[in-house]
Image (spheres, rainbow, N blue to C red):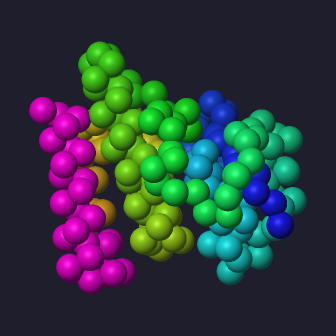
């Protein structure tokens, strides 16, 4: 058991966006789950059906796709303890000022955390779309896809609550 926390490197983010390094499905699945906030154990629990183990983290780290981000002080990190800006988020391509960058990072973090928490592996394709999103508009365009996936996986009431939170973040980022 390990409480290590990893984040994607620039090489890892590039692989997610472009598939430039042609990672196999097993390594790519793990790379998608690495977000700079979840511990190895939390990720391994979600990927247990794929037979993942700590060695896959080490392989990705050795190849330069991820790097250690620290150790978790508690078994489960609270959302309030999250840092305000996550270095794992790709930098938006639009030069829309600091407010736009912050809005992008908040939306990116919301999408990745929500997909991981509520959809797990069922959200794999949606997670790939989030990783490819280069600006706020790209992330906003994924709202309906997230809503549909949440409604299917968790039911309409829970989906409505999550989407209401997302709508607030969208208003902040675009308003």
Count of marks overlaid on the render: 0
- Splitting the image into 4 quarters, where does residue 42 fall? bottom right
Residue at image position (84%, 50%) is 59
Was residue 160 drawn as part of the magenta stretch in this picture? yes
Residue 54 drawn at (x, y percent): 83, 61
Residue at image position (58%, 57%) is 77
- Splitting the image into 4 quarters, where does residue 166 fall? bottom left
**Res 95 visible:** yes
Observer-nearest of 83 and 174: 83
Report the magenta stretch's main SS: helix
Q: Which residues are magenta?
A: 148-175
Residue 26 drawn at (x, y percent): 71, 63
Give the side of residue 133 with respect to residue 15, left or right: left
Residue at image position (64%, 40%) is 8
Give the side of residue 160 with respect to residue 21, left or right: left
Above or below, comparing residue 99 to residue 141 in the picture:
above
Residue 146 drawn at (x, y percent): 30, 63
Was residue 65 drawn as part of the magenta stretch in this picture? no
Give the side of residue 37 with respect to residue 123, left or right: right
Q: Which quadrant, please, contains the N terminus?
A: bottom right
């Amino acid at each position: 058991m390990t409480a290590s926390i990893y984040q994607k490197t620039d090489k890892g983010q590039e692989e997610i966006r472009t598939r430039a390094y042609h990672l196999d499905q097993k390594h790519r699945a793990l790379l998608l789950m690495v977000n700079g906030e979840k511990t190895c154990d939390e990720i391994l629990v979600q990927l247990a059906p794929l037979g993942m183990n700590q060695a896959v983290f080490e392989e990705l780290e050795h190849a330069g796709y991820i790097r250690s981000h620290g150790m978790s002080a508690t078994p489960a990190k609270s959302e309030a303890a999250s840092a305000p800006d996550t270095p794992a988020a790709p930098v938006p391509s639009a030069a829309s000022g600091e407010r736009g960058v912050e809005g992008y990072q908040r939306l990116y973090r919301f999408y990745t955390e929500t997909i991981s928490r509520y959809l797990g592996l069922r959200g794999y394709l949606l997670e790939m779309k989030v990783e490819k999103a280069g600006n706020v508009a790209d992330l906003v365009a994924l709202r309906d896809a997230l809503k549909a996936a949440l409604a299917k996986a968790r039911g309409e009431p829970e989906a409505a609550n999550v989407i209401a939170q997302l709508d607030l973040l969208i208003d902040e980022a675009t308003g």
